[in-house]
Image (tube, rainbow, N blue to C red):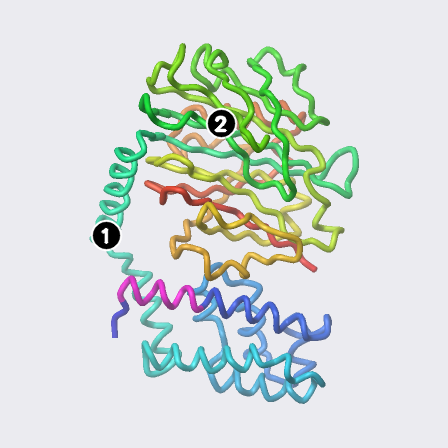
Amino acid sequence: MALNEVEVAQIRRAGEHFKKVLRETFELFPRSARTIAGFARWTEINKSTSQRLVQALTKSTDGIDVIVTLPGINGLKQINSAVKKLINDTDSLHIFNQMVDEYEDLILQYASSQSELKRALQKFQSKASVSADTYNRKLKKSAYETNREITGESVDILAGVHFFRVSPNDNSFIDEFILSNKIGVELSKFARPFVQSFGGNLGEITIQDPIPLNENQASSFQVNKRSEYLLKQFSSPRIEESYAGVGNLKNSVVYNHTVDPINCGKFDITIAHMDPKTQRNPITDDFKIVCQSIMQRSPAKRLILVALLDKKLDQACQIQSGCYPASVKIHEIGHQPEDLWGERFSDAPEIKIFNPEDASLASKLKIEHMDRLLQTGFELLQEKAENFIGYFIDVEYPLWLTSHRFYFKFEE
């Protein structure tokens, strides 16, 4: 049996839904039963089956992982029967009952058993057909070229570098610092003006006029005040002269590409956004989600999202990424990333890790200025790279008008 790309995408989405169901179901269990050993003791289910159930929630990176990690149908039914005897409110288990039925239907739709489905998925992933990759790239490139012609807008490299750390002045909060770096922006005469907004903040933000800052003016940076800065060493010369003000909703800045010095030519621009105490520290607060995102407003050849986490935060969280319609809200209080499984595109870019101390990101991405950009960020924050860990995704011809995101989920 061989699976095609459409079938694998459908299976992946089903797995994302099952993970959401597992999270909701685990909320019904005693806290002591949410680990492998604890669940095995509580239900008297063998440790192997318990391990597969718990890890389908805690260790899976995407929907395919969930499908191949879950216990078999008999194991799930055994779990269902045991839990029903331990929980008085069995009506609350209806979503788990339904998931077991849907999982059985999924297996029968694509295979004769779970093990056969698992082998088919692993075979599909191991082959990673070059011809399929080439075809997908051609489709995405064609979409980029079409959208570029329609909109009169394009970007060669769209990069977002997001730092977040425990606030040094109040460890019950975290600070966020965003470097929005765009290379090779080109807008036709009748295109929309260049608009820069920032993604990742929990609450509404109010943007101010960006302060032009060159590499000799680090002392002008205010680390304890919400503010915006134009980093001149990573921007085209005199681009501050085309600044056109703050957007109507006060959450973006606007540049007029039709005037000097741009005059509808290609330009580079890097704007920094400092947001101290952006939200409460998820290690100690009840809200356990931090999101960082980059919205693709104009058709782009390449999108890069980099996250730099304070190691104290990194040790307490799990990371996942996804691509969402730009209209889908980043997150809300009480919201889990899995709640958006039905909105997320099947495209799930690989998350890669790097050590900021090594100054190796430029060579990994083949973007010459990237290490200098990170170093500038650390200097402005007055932080040492050794105290952070780095993650990034790199997407070629990303879908237009989408938002690529990192979700960091902290332990309860």
| Residue occupying image coordinates x 67% and y 58% | 411
Residue furthest to the front in view is 248
Type of amino acid at the residue the image marks with label 1: Val
Choose the circle earlier in sequence order: 2 or 1: 1
| Residue occupying image coordinates x 56% and y 26% | 272
> Which quarter of the rendered picture does the N terminus lie within?
bottom left
Q: Position of residue 15 (x, y in %)?
A: 45, 68
Q: Position of residue 53 (x, y in %)?
A: 55, 74
Q: Which residues are magenta?
A: 4-14
Magenta span contains residue 214? no
> Which quarter of the rendered picture does the C terminus lie within?
bottom right
Q: CA distance from mark 2 to mark 1?
A: 31 Å
Q: Which mark is residue 371?
A: 2
Q: Which residue is mark 1?
A: 130
Within-10-Å neighbours for mark 1: few <14, some 14–19, many 20+: few
| Residue occupying image coordinates x 40% and y 13% | 259
Work out whether residue 256 or residue 40 is closer to the camera in this orientation and state it.
256
| Residue occupying image coordinates x 66% and y 52% | 316
411 vs 161, left or right, is right
Q: Which mark is residue 379?
A: none
SS assignment at label 2: helix
Q: Position of residue 408 (x, y in %)?
A: 59, 50
SS assignment at label 1: helix
304 vs 227, left or right, is left
Q: Above or below — where is 6 with respect to 96?
A: above
Q: Above or below — where is 221 with respect to 370?
A: above
Work out whether residue 291 or residue 125 is closer to the camera in this orientation and state it.
291
